[in-house]
Every structure is written in structure tokens, then in C-alpha cells.
Amino acid sequence: MSANPVSTHPAATPSPKARRIFINDLVLDCLIGVHRHERDGTQRIRINLDLAVLESPNPIEDRLSNVLCYENVIVKVRELATAGHVNLVETLAERLANLCLSEPGVQSVKVRVEKLDVFADAASVGIEISRTTRSHH
């Protein structure tokens, strides 16, 4: 028996480390909806985001510049969601997903957008989507 047997199995390629960044229950006033009464004023929406961010091989070193800053993401989300009227929550969710995927290192995102005050007997109505970068399958 050889001291160093040759393996017939290829070496396992380590999967990249990912970190999850989440933003929960961001409530904004937004111009959204297809009905006439929805065009005349804002509605409260709730946004939840879950981003999978590829970790850098470099150490974090307790420096904000070495991670994705969720404050910057929130600022951009607020700007996008309040920039003007949008008809559909689906459209807003897609725009938010694209915004998140444009951030450095973001591999995938789950976006949930809810309209909060549509029905008296329902807490919310909305949509949830998941999207990935084209290079990430």
C-alpha cells in the first residue's frame, strides 16, 4: 500500500462565502397604483430586502469600506421608491431588485413590496420576487 495514494476524486472547489444583508420593514410613502384615487396621493408601502453579498477575500478589518453599507442601500431605495408615480408593485419590485443587483458584490436579492392600506380587512397586499445576477446561476 502506498503512503500517498492518488485520489481519483477531483479536489473540491470551495464555494465563495456569502453574507446576507437584510433590510426589514422599511415603510415609505409612495405614489403607486393604477386607479384614479391612487394617482392623487401617496400610499404607505413596506419594503423588505434580503441581499446575498459575495464576501471579499480580504479581511473586513472592522472598516465600513470593506463591506456593503446598508445605509447607502436604504438611501438609494428611498430615492427610487419616491422618485415619481409607478403603476404596479411588480414594477417597483423589479426596479428595486435591479438597484440592489447593481451594488458591488450582490449576487442575489429577494424583494418584497407591500401596499399597507388597500383593504380594511387585510394587513397588506403585494409581491415578492427573487433575482440573481446574470453571472450567478
Image (tube, rainbow, N blue to C red):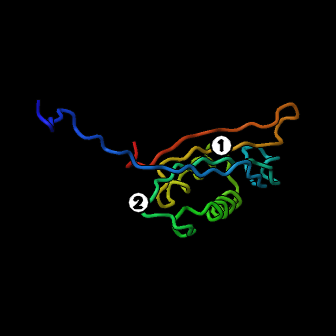
Q: Residue at x 70, y 55 (%)?
A: 85
- Inspect the image, locate mark 2, and give the three-letter code of the amino acid beneath it: Pro
Measured in 3D between alpha carbons, the distance from the residue under mark 2 to the one under mark 1, in whole angstroms, is 30 Å
In-image side of 82 versus 17 (left or right): right
Q: In this view, does 48 lie above or below 103?
A: above
Q: Between 48 and 91, which is closer to the camera in this rendering?
A: 48
What is the total number of numbered labels drawn onto the structure image?
2
Residue 79 point in image, percent of width and height: 67, 63
Please tell me the numbered disc located at residue 112: 1
Of all residues, the one furthest to the left in this rendering is: 1
- Identify the element where label 2 is drawn: loop
Q: Which mark is residue 57?
A: 2
**Where does residue 15 sit, x and y in percent of width and height?**
38, 45
**Element carrying mark 1:** strand
| Quarter of the image with the C terminus in it | top left
- Locate residue 48, reporting x and y percent: 67, 47
Quarter occupied by residue 76: bottom right
Q: Which amino acid does label 1 sit on?
A: Arg
Residue 26: which numbered mark, if any? none
Instruction: Name the residue: 53% across, 63% down.
Output: 67
Position of residue 70 measured from the top left corner of the image (x, y, whole percent): 62, 60
